[in-house]
Amino acid sequence: MWRGTWRGWTMLVTCDDGIVLTGEHHEKLLDAQPLDVPGIEGDLAGCRTVIHLGTAVSASRELAFDLRTAIRLYERVPMGPDGADVDLTLDDRTLLAWLRRRGGAVEILAT
């Protein structure tokens, strides 16, 4: 399996329809190491790797499908105070903005 290097932050995020892991959390999941975040073991079983522009994340099946679709459709995400749109990438800030824009609860469990 391909393993990319992570850039920037590292986060573990839950939303209404799944979980996303980036950076060290993604690498630990690939290496089958414990994540030190209680209560998420059941959510990790169906995670899929999503790779875009050299960055890899793990996401639950539904979120991975939605994320791949959004990337294929060149979806843009409003960022910053002026709301300027940027291309959807897998860096933590843009990914978090995309998750929040989808609606529902988004909670960062670990950084």
Image (cartoon, rainbow, N blue to C red):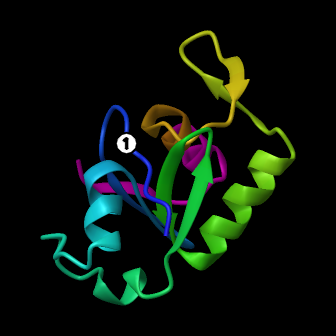
The boundaries of the magenta stretch are: 97-111
Residue 27 vs 86, above or below: the answer is: below
User: Tag 1: Cα neighbours inside 10 Å, few (<14), some, or many (≥20)?
Assistant: some
Image coordinates for residue 74, horizontal then vertical, percent: 83, 38
Residue 110 vs 98, above or below: the answer is: below
Image coordinates for residue 105, horizontal then vertical, percent: 49, 59
Quarter residue 63 falls in: bottom right
Horizontally, residue 57 falls left or right of residue 110, namely: right
Secondary structure category for the residue under label 1:
loop
Image coordinates for residue 92, horizontal then vertical, percent: 44, 39
Tell me what residue is drawn at x 19 percent, y 75 percent.
33
Front-most of 71 and 2? Answer: 2
Tell me what residue is drawn at x 39 percent, y 81 percent.
44
Verify whether residue 106 appears in magenta. Answer: yes
Tell me what residue is drawn at x 54 percent, y 34 percent.
94
Residue 54 vs 56, above or below: the answer is: above
Horizontally, residue 103 falls left or right of residue 26, namely: right
Horizontally, residue 76 falls left or right of residue 51, namely: right
Tell me what residue is drawn at x 23 percent, y 47 percent.
111
Verify whether residue 73 appears in magenta. Answer: no
Given the image, on which type of amino acid does mark 1 rest?
Trp
- Pointer 1: what residue? 6
Residue 97 vs 41, above or below: the answer is: above
